[in-house]
Amino acid sequence: MELSPTLPTGAAPAVLVKICGLTRADEAASCIAAGADWIGLNFHPGSPRFLDPDRSGEIVSAIGSPERAVGLFVNRPAAEVARVAARLGISTVQLHGDEPPEDLVALTHLRIVRAFRLGRPEDVEAMAGYLDRARSLGRVPDAVLVDALVAGVAGGTGTVVAGPVLDRLASMATSDSLPPMILAGGLNPENVRGRVDRVRPWMVDVASGVESGPGRKDPRLVAAFIRAARGEPRERPGQPVDKGSGAD
Ligand SMILES: O=C(O)c1ccccc1N[C@@H]1O[C@H](COP(=O)(O)O)[C@@H](O)[C@H]1O
């Protein structure tokens, strides 16, 4: 199954950007207008960014392209994930808990982003083991998302992935055995470019690092994040664009 937007090809493609945890239609539309490739709708009841699936149709409509909306679930039954996705007309889901590879098989008709919370370099090997099991079942995730491990919290913690884990990931990023990688975990406009340069992910994902409050995205931070991720110069209000200093 192909991902959409399609995988970039050729040398040094621009990293794609997902902004996660939208709770308002106007903010979701602004993220897309600012250049976000995907937005995330968080259906995990334990999250401060929780969105009732029954009230998220308005957000999907507001972005004008349902293929850019990703439904985020934590340890929900595959049948429930499939039901919500069908009701909203979305085709990509993010599984951010301990979902077994069998769930990927049950959700073959959807694009699946499988999240892994990694605390130590050894956790990267555990992720590889999971992918091997998925491969043996004939259904690898369409992308893997890498987040920091914080005990007792599923995600959205604003915690960065540890340096030794990033180094291990960087050595795997171009491996054929790894699906496209989405780097998450404590990203913000200040640190995203350095992390992109270090790991070369296919996409970056941010929740808390572009917020004015839980679930409320700050349009200036969103724009700054997207520009920084792509290595574009910063915009400064009332001043010409700084073309000399890069994004960091
Ligand atoms: O955002 C949340 O509240 C959340 C809750 C449960 C699982 C995942 C969640 N968000 C995902 O976590 C990453 C990292 O968040 P942050 O940028 O460190 O705040 C985020 O990209 C979401 O995909």
Image: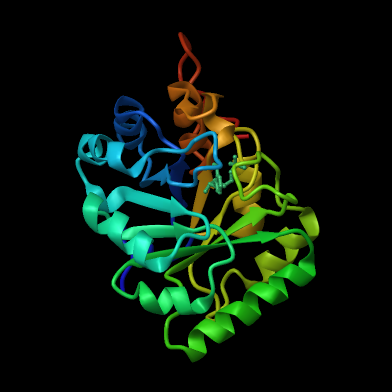
Count of numbered circles in the view: 0
- Quadrant of residue 28 in the image? top left
Q: Is residue 247 left or right of residue 223?
A: right
- Residue at (53%, 37%) from the top-left corner? 228
Scheme of image coloration: rainbow
**Closest to the observer: 108 or 204?**
108
- Residue nearest the viewer, comparing 177 with 207: 207
Q: Is residue 43 above or below residue 6?
A: above
The residue positioned 44% from the left and 65% from the top of the image is 77
| Residue 247 visible (yes or no) | no
Pick out the residue farthest to the bottom: 136
When the figure is inspected, residue 231 is found, relative to residue 2, above or below; the finding is above
In this view, the residue in front, 114 or 168, is 114
Q: Position of residue 39 (x, y in %)?
A: 38, 43
Whole-percent x and y of residue 58?
Answer: 23, 35
Picture residue at 78% right of the left edge, 71% below the top = 122
> Is residue 162 visible to us here?
yes
* The quarter of the displayed image where residue 194 is located: top right
State which quarter of the image contains the N terminus: bottom left
Residue at (51%, 82%) from the top-left corner? Answer: 134
Classify the position of the C terminus by image quarter.
top right
Ligand 1 falls in quadrant:
top right
Where residue 127 appears, as percent x and y from the top left, is 64, 73
Please give left or right for residue 44 compared with residue 171 in the image: left
Q: Quadrant of residue 132?
A: bottom right
Q: Can you give x and y, in whole percent of width and height, for residue 170 in the image?
A: 66, 65
Q: Is residue 127 above or below residue 155?
A: below
